Image (tube, rainbow, N blue to C red):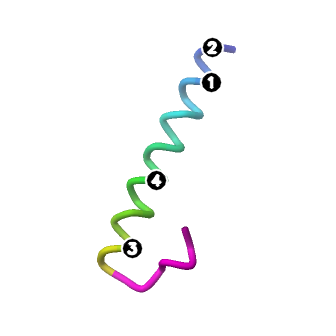
Amino acid sequence: MNKSKKLNHTSFMIASTICHAALISTEFEFFC
């Protein structure tokens, strides 16, 4: 269960990074 929680956190961090990159390179501000 702890491993699953960490995996979920990692996925969130990756999604956040991608969202931030999209924010810089495109006009997807509303997507975040």
Disc 4 target residue: 16
Residue type pointed to by label 4: Ser
Mark 3 surroundings within 10 Å by alpha-carbon count, few (fewer than 14), some (14 through 19), many (20 or more): some
Separation of marks 3 and 2 at Cα, in angstroms? 31 Å
Q: Quadrant of residue 6?
A: top right
Quadrant the N terminus occupies = top right
Amino acid type at mark 1: Lys
Between circles 1 and 3, the one closer to the viewer is 3
Local secondary structure at mark 4: helix
Q: Is residue 28 magenta?
A: yes
| Residue drawn at the location 38% of the way across and 54% of the way down | 17
Question: For the view shown, which residue lies furthest in the right direction?
Answer: 1
Give the Cα distance between marks 2 and 1: 5 Å
Residues at badges 3 and 2 in contact (C-beta under 8 Å)? no
What residue is disc 3 on?
A: 23
Q: Is residue 22 above or below residue 15?
A: below
Query: Does residue 4 appear to the left or right of 18 in the view shown?
Result: right
Amino acid at the residue labelled 3: Leu
The answer for how far apart the CA atoms under marks 1 and 3 are is 27 Å
Is 1 left or right of 28, judged from the image as shown? right
User: Pointers 2 and 4 in contact (CB under 8 A)?
Assistant: no
- Label 2 close to label 1 by CB (< 8 Å): yes
Q: Which residues are magenta?
A: 26-32
**What amino acid type should be assigned to the residue bearing mark 2?**
Asn
| Residue that carries the numbered disc 2 in the rendered image | 2
Crowding at mark 1 (Cα within 10 Å: few <14, some 14-19, many 20+): few
- The numbered disc on residue 5 is 1
> Which comes before the other along the chain, label 3 or label 2?
2
